[in-house]
Structures are given as structure tokens and as C-alpha cells.
Amino acid sequence: MKQTDMFFKDEKPWVVCYSGGHSSALVAIEAVRKHGKDNVCLLNHNISPKVEHEDIKRFKEEVANYLGIEITYANMEGWEEKTPLDVCRDKSAFKVQKNNALCTYALKTEPFLNWLKTYYPATTGEIRDDVTLLYGFDKDEPDRIIRRNSHMGTLGYKTEFPLAFWERTIDVTEEIGIKRPSTYEIWKHANCIGCLKAKKQHWYLVFCLRPDIWEEAKLAESEIGFSIIKDNFLDELECQFKRMRDKGIIPTEKIKYQTFWAAVKKEIPEEEMRLPCECAI
């Protein structure tokens, strides 16, 4: 679905940064309940189905249908086929300025800024009062709220954070009969599988559950010459991950990072973890 006329009743739309995750869905629901569906825009950036789970796409469509709003898409050209790793291989880099993931910039940030420039161009040093951007950060993320508010304010846009500061009317989408994406049963977020901002625990899941993406990521590291995870190339982790898998370490992000690796250390002694694959028992 795509909104093309950009008409809103009060001409001061509330633009939900609608990622397809649970938090952004709650923001969309709160925005419509507070300001009406005719004043809300659900702005999404479609990601290749190779890395964005089909149930995330199901979820964002069901929430949009429940609200009676068509999703507005601001997509990178070629998004249907290009994965985050493809984007990085094209640019021969994983990171851009300030250590931000290149794929995030190409797939989301740049299309988002282009959309704003097209429909709501801002003037340097002034804040537009006819559009407000809504984000899904909650009260436990004060640093992210401060950074995003400051950054978008510098660009000339107002931001609000309904999950942190509005009076809440809904806590989970199951309250309206919409099940969260099945990815939340294993993964921490509704991000791309093979997230280039994620840590080693996430990549253990990729190794176990998506060997195709694992192999693609190893190839990208080889071509680019840098590692995705700080201080570790993926091929250097394969022996460790194989040993963890063989020992029955469950691939999940539902356990906190420190707790997960403490459990691994308890199950597999450090000296065994360091053994090369051919020496494993």
C-alpha cells in the first residue's frame, strides 16, 4: 500500500516511524487514538524478504489494516533484492561516519530524509510546526530519546516519543487481537536477520538458523577486509560456534547477553573453547 496524496485533515500530520516492530506498532495505535487516523502517516522502509521475516511484513500490514491507514513507503531503489550485506559490498564498507551501519543509512535513513525533503522540506535553524515525527523509544531509553530529538531538531523537525511520555492506552498488540511477529520468540528485535549492528550472540543465532546469511556475511568480510563484530571475523568464530551448537547451546536472544555467555562458559571450559575444530572431542 502507498499513500500518494499526502493529505491530512488538520494538515499537521503525525508521522510514525513505522519499522514493523512491536514498539512502532504501539506508537501507531496511540497516535491514531489520540489524533485520529486522518492525521497519521505510517512511514515504513521495506527491506528485502531475504532478511526481513515474512511475519514482520504480516504484522505491519495487520496493524495498518486495523487502524484503517495505508502504509506509506520510502524505499531504497532495488530493496526487493539488495540485502544489507549487498549494500555494504557495493560500498566496500560496513560503517559510515560516527560508526553508523552503512546498511541502515542506505536502506532507511537516506530514503527517510529524501521523503522529508520532498514533502516537508525544512530550513536550517528553524523547526517546522506542521509535522511531528513519532518514535518508539520508551522511558528506559533516555539517551536514545535525547540523541534523536537533538539530531532531528538540528534538521528542523519536531519529535515525540509516545511510549515514554504519553498516557498509554495499550501495552501489547495482543490486546487488539494482533499477534506480535514470531521473530520475537527467538530474536530480541524485529531487525534484519544478520544485523550489522548486533553482537556475537546474534551472530550465533545466524550461524545456527540462517547458514545462508552466515556464508554471505563471511564473503562480505573477506571482500571488504573488515569484521562485522568488533575484534572477531566470523570465520574465526566458526569453531567456537560449532562447539556451542554441538554442546546444545540454544540459539536465542531472549536471554540477556551477559547471562547467555556466562551459561556458555559454564557449559564449555575456556580451554576447550579455544581448541581448533579438528581437535574438538
Image: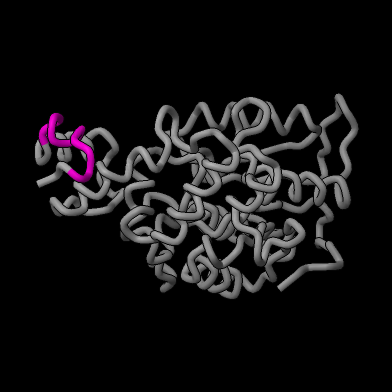
The percent coordinates of residue 166 (x first, y second) are: 53, 43
Res 255 → quadrant: top left
The percent coordinates of residue 29 (x first, y second) are: 55, 60
Region in magenta: 269-278
Q: Which residue is pictured at 13% across the width and 35% down the height?
A: 272
Does the stretch in magenta take in 274?
Answer: yes
Q: Mainly helix, strand or loop, the magenta region? A: helix
Res 77 → quadrant: bottom right
The percent coordinates of residue 99 (x first, y second) are: 59, 28
The percent coordinates of residue 194 (x first, y second) are: 47, 51
Q: Which residue is pictured at 57% across the width and 41% down the height?
A: 161
Q: Which residue is pictured at 38% across the width and 66% down the height?
A: 182
Q: Is residue 15 above or below residue 94?
A: below
- In the figure, is residue 154 to the left or right of 22? right
- In the figure, is residue 256 to the left or right of 169? left
Q: Which residue is pictured at 33% across the width and 40% down the height?
A: 237
Residue 169 is at least partly visible in this image: no
| Residue toward you, 246 or 110 | 246
Quarter placement of the N terminus: bottom right
Q: Is residue 52 above or below residue 207?
A: below
Q: Residue extending furthest front?
A: 278
